[in-house]
Amino acid sequence: MTGPTPSEKLTAMSEDVTMWFNPSCSKCRGAREILDEDGITATYVDYLRDAPTRAELERVLTLLGESDPKAITRTGETRYAELSLDDADRDALLEALAANPILIERPIVIRGGRAVIGRPPERVRELFE
């Protein structure tokens, strides 16, 4: 796949891009490489250190076009089982995500009024089509 055209790069630069990023995650690093290759400047938020609030989680769900917090939950994570979240309701799951950011799917890339989960990392390009 080829990168964006110069005019697409200018358009991309006119909107802020933010990635919820875990430096030890290969998918996050892959998504960052794609953005770098495409000349897209982004703000990288280490969401494990700077955990999103419940309101930020709600906003990202809206930008993803989702209402169910499981869409951004790493259900295979050990902490998920430890907290017995399989039957958690929406509120309990959002609270768990805010309190335990390791449970948040990664990377999440936000641009303007849209967001994507970068799994696979190439999905980040959807924000620039």
Image (tube, helix red, strand yellow):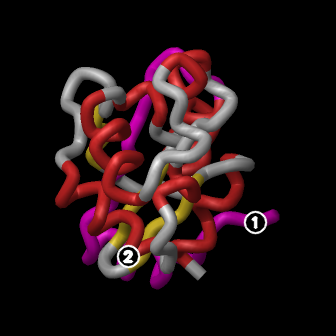
* Quadrant (top left, top right, bottom left, bottom right) of the C terminus: bottom right
Callout 2 touching callout 1 (CB < 8 Å): no
Give the x, y percent position of residue 3.
66, 65
Q: Which residue is mark 2?
A: 62
In the rendered view, would you say 73 is above or below 84? below
The residue closer to the viewer here, 1 or 85, is: 85
Tell me the quarter of the picture where residue 33 sits: top right
Label 1: which secondary element = loop
Which residue is at 73% across, 49% downward? 120
- In the picture as drawn, the residue positioned furthest to the right comes out as 1
**Secondary-structure class at tag 2:** helix
- Three-letter residue code for mark 2: Thr
Q: Residues within 10 Å of mark 2 (few under 14, many from 20)?
A: some
The residue at which mark 1 appears reads as 2
Looking at this view, is 45 or 3 the one in front?
45
Q: Residue at x 70, y 55 (%)?
A: 122
Q: Is residue 23 left or right of residue 5?
A: left
Q: Position of residue 125 (x, y in %)?
A: 61, 65
Is residue 37 in sight in this rendering? no
Residue 98: percent from the left, percent from the top? 27, 39
Which residue is nearer to you in this view: 42 or 59?
A: 59
Q: Which residues are magenta?
A: 1-26
Q: Amino acid at mark 1?
A: Thr
Q: Is residue 44 visible?
A: yes
Q: CA distance from mark 2 to mark 1?
A: 30 Å
Asked whether residue 16 is drawn in magenta, I would say yes
Quadrant of the rendered image containing residue 47:
top left
Mark 1 burial class by Cα count in 10 Å: few <14, some 14-19, many 20+: few
Which residue: 46% across, 73% down? 67
Q: Which residue is depicted at the point 31% across and 76% down?
A: 112
